[in-house]
Image: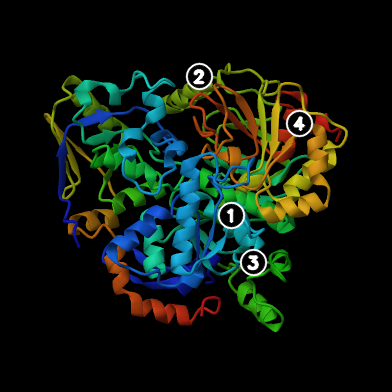
Amino acid sequence: MKESAIKEIKGSAIYVEGNDIDTDRIIPARFMKCVTFDGLGDYLFYDVRYDSNRNNKEHPLNDHRYADASILISDNNFGCGSSREHAPQSIQKAGYNAVIAGSFAEIFFGNSTNLGIVCASVDDAGRKKIVEEIESDPSLLMTIDVENCLVKVGSIQVPFTIKKGARESLLSGRYDTLNELLEGDSDVEEVVANLEYIS
Amino acid sequence: MGKTLFEKVWEAHSVRELSNGQTQLLIGTHLIHEVTSPQAFGMLREKGLAVRYPNRTFATVDHIVPTNESAEPYSDGLAQAMIEELRKNCAENNITFFDTNTGKQGIVHIVGPEQGITQPGTTIACGDSHTSTHGAFGAIAFGIGTSQVRDVLATQTIALNQLKVRRINVNGQLAPGVYAKDVILHIIRVLGTNGGTGFAYEYGGEVFDRFSMEERMTVCNMSIEGGARVGYVNPDDTTFDYLRDRKYCPNGDEFESAITRWRAFASDSDCHYDDLVEIDANEIQPTVTWGINPSQGVGVNENIPTVESGGTQSERASIEEALEHMSFEGGSPVKGKKIDVAFLGSCTNGRLSDLQEVAQFLKGKKVAEGVKAIVVPGSQVVASIAKAQGLDEIYTEAGFEWRGAGCSMCLAMNPDKLIGDQLCASSSNRNFKGRQGSPTGRTMLMSPLMVAAAAITGEISDAREVFNF
Ligand code: SF4
């Protein structure tokens, strides 16, 4: 298996404000006309970043101070809407390894974890502190410590929560489920044999 | 103590526990379409893996097919490439594909039930969040991401956390002009867009007992809009009557023994629910969304909320953002908002009964000047039955464009799109910013008859008044 354990994520961060940021906002459907995920990074937040002539609109992703960011911060119910993996794929391909939000939509969370994107939930007060830090100095490096469930930036430390199973998969490097699923094949055959609609 | 349907189906399909505590769950039926499967086949190829149970995967093409042209190559080269990729992947792997020339093509969540592939007591997965639709039959049906599509192709299983079950009872009587769509918009309005996180929704009560399968599907379809990944209704005689004689169902004596098996999956009367919600059917109004997520809805005779009415800072911010996008004034009536486009279709409301219900009121009426109205059957089967019943003529005479089967204007992956800040009365399921193809486009969700009423009057109207209930 090529992926390795993810114990911490280090990088600078960017804040994209808003609750209920849905998958259509993350990547508009018209950019899903593709047969591979390559190149999806260019379309991240496309419609809120650019106007119809592809001129920059005011958006944190167009702010050069955050150009190197590899951690995305947002608010509650991030990633709601469709099950399209194009959303976390575009986030990853645009260079982000982690998302900090108040909460995550379930399918988005699962898809992201499967790709090794760390989805850390931080409460409103905690996020406020973090955002204040990075806005006062966008180049500040942040550490997401998966082992201890802590976000560290500047002089502050804020706890985060993450589903236990997801945390364990990241720490063990087994977040991509396929290999382990393949190992269960003989058990699969047994279950299939008991299901009349399949066998 | 008894068990819920969810628990029974889960147990019957559990393979084993994985090292991270998740369950390896067998997916009995896998549905695929052109948007979320090509990358999965690519991953399989990269790893040198074969499709494990090709006869348990069924494919159709829906999102990118144009509904106003049928000859290939399509004018959109990307769309052509996607349909060809799916053809190739299905042929190479011996997967049944309901292609455009089979007479069975359509939106995946309409095709599955129509062909009898969707059955009670089964697990179903598809790379599409509205897979919850199939729960109407008492199946546990999940929307999954592309990596999981790969997992199902390679292993016929996925890794999942077990869900809690919330029973939602809707008792009482729906007033005339109030439909299944209003029931689910009302439920989402009450429970919120993420109220269902971690839950499967089990819908029941008098209203669901009386509902047809198509109405049950409309509700289950939008479970995901309430944050619930799974929504289902316990199987009963209505379910079995629908399935009898469908192509992929057992037939003859085998069908009778299947019924016995299916019935046993229904939740036991003494089962435990993690949560229980009671909804009074008499309180449900024809509901219209005014904002940018499906929980932002009001009864057609209510006013749009003001920013100040939000209980928390974040609610106020959400209302403000929605009002700004929609160019609506807080406190103004939702009725009377001028529309530009009326869209009747989608996996929520593009079924035969939707088209029939509207058609019976449409005779002798005309779409308002300046309104573009389109009606898009959810599948080729729906289209051909509707045509045989003369529905296409009723629609075209009223001024609707009658289209071919597909997702059409539900999302912007085919030529049907909003332009600029057009306002669309839509029978689909999502009103997110940009959903219908224009970043500034505006969507108001409602029942099919309410869409027709808006088309005829040119503005959001109470269908009960327009059609003299
Ligand atoms: S009709 Fe809309 S919601 Fe349904 S599958 Fe097609 S795009 Fe998705």
Which amino acid, by three-letter code, is at mark 2? Glu
Viewer-side label of 3, 2? 3
- For label 3, being within 8 Å of ligand 1 is answered no
For the residues tagged 1 and 4, is the chain the same? Answer: yes
Which amino acid, by three-letter code, is at mark 1? His
Which amino acid, by three-letter code, is at mark 4? Ala
Task: Name the element at disc 4.
Answer: helix
- For label 1, being within 8 Å of ligand 1 is answered yes
Residue B139: x %, y % from top left: 56, 64
Viewer-side label of 1, 4? 1
Residue at image mark 1: B109
Residue at image mark 4: B453
Which amino acid, by three-letter code, is at mark 3? Gly
Residue at image mark 3: B116
Q: Quadrant of residue B187?
A: top right
N-terminal-most mark, 1 or 4: 1
CB under 8 Å between discs 2 and 4: no
Residue B164: x %, y % from top left: 46, 58
Q: Chain of mark 3?
A: B
N-terminal-most mark, 3 or 1: 1
Residue at image mark 2: B324
N-terminal-most mark, 3 or 4: 3
